[in-house]
Structure formats: structure tokens, C-alpha cells
Image (tube, rainbow, N blue to C red):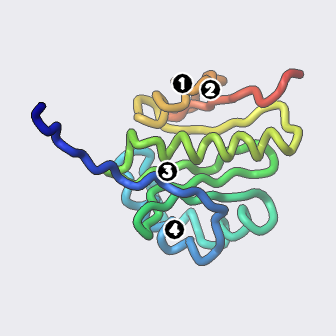
Amino acid sequence: MADEPHQVSEPAATLRQAVPADWPAVMALRLSVTENRLSDPSKVTQAMYDAYVTTTGRGWVAESGGRIDGFCIAGRDGLVWALFVRPGCEGRGVGRLLMDECIAWLASLGLAEAQLETDLGTRAERFYRRFGWFEAGRRGREVTFRLPLRAA
């Protein structure tokens, strides 16, 4: 019997709640993406990140090998403010891991639905559609999605 090639899989990403010390890495990751790029990066400040994780919401990071591979931030109002995966880490379950944690947290707040906006024609749009988000409107090149969290 011939030996089969041995493939070493990458370590699974670990998930943890984001802290303000993560923001430099999170902001760098946000600026590294090729889709849903910020037209004016100065409009998203560290103070905005801080507010989400200290008062108005919560954030999570997915790490592997000591590096942040993705992050998600949501508000207590049900708005998923950000979900981004490092280029080269797409398709490895990082986005799903982050989204599942985010949705579980929003549902635990007793909210009826979550919502978000993303650019049309992107991997992100396809990701949300694949996981049950429904289109609730369009504005220019952006699409608004909603996801029911519990039975009304």
C-alpha cells in the first residue's frame, strides 16, 4: 500500500471578544480588503471602534498564528457595523465563525432582527445571501440585508 500524501491543515481560528488594543490591527485589516473599501478612511475612527465595544455594542476577532484574520462589530440596535476577513483567509470559515457569534449575541438581546449594508456584486453580498439574509432595499451601490433572529 502506497503512502498517501500528508497534508497539514492550518490551525483553526480562535474567537474572542475584541478589546481596544486590537484596533490598530483591526484598522489595518479593514484597510487591506479589496472589496467594500472605505472611500475615506478618516471617517472611521478609533473612537468609533471604541464606542462599539465599550458602550453601544460588541466586537469579536478571529485569530490564528497570533494574527487577527477577521473581525466583526455589531450594535445593540441590531446593526452589524462591520464584518471583514483578511485577504487570503476567505473561504476558511472565519467569516462564518464571526457571524455565528455575532448573531447569537444579538439574539440573546431579544432583538427580532439584525441588519447590515454591503456593496452590491461582492463576495460579502453572496456570503450574506448564502446564510439566509434577505434583501430589504438598495441605495446606490449598496444593498441592505435583514435577518430574522427569533419568531415574532
Cα–Cα gap, marks 3 and 2:
17 Å
Above or below: residue 87 compared with residue 41 = above
Residue type at mark 3: give it: Phe
**Crowding at label 1, few (<14), some or many (≥20) Cα neighbours within 10 Å?**
some
Say what secondary structure mark 3 lies in. strand
Cα–Cα gap, marks 1 and 3:
16 Å
What residue is drawn where x is 64% and y is 74%?
20
How far from the left and from the top, in percent, is residue 25? 47, 70
Q: Are the residues at dot 4 and dot 1 in contact (C-beta closer than 8 Å)? A: no
Q: Which mark, by number, is residue 42?
A: 4
Task: Check disc 2 and report the residue beneath it.
Answer: 133
Task: Check disc 1 and report the residue beneath it.
Answer: 129
Say what secondary structure mark 4 lies in. helix
Task: Check disc 3 and report the residue beneath it.
Answer: 84
In the shown orientation, is residue 100 left or right of residue 92? right
Above or below: residue 4 compared with residue 133 = below
Labels 2, 4: front one: 2
Label 1 vs 3, first from the N-terminus: 3
Q: Are the residues at dot 2 and dot 1 in contact (C-beta closer than 8 Å)? A: yes
Say what secondary structure mark 2 lies in. loop
Q: Are the residues at dot 2 and dot 4 in contact (C-beta closer than 8 Å)? A: no
Residue type at mark 1: give it: Arg
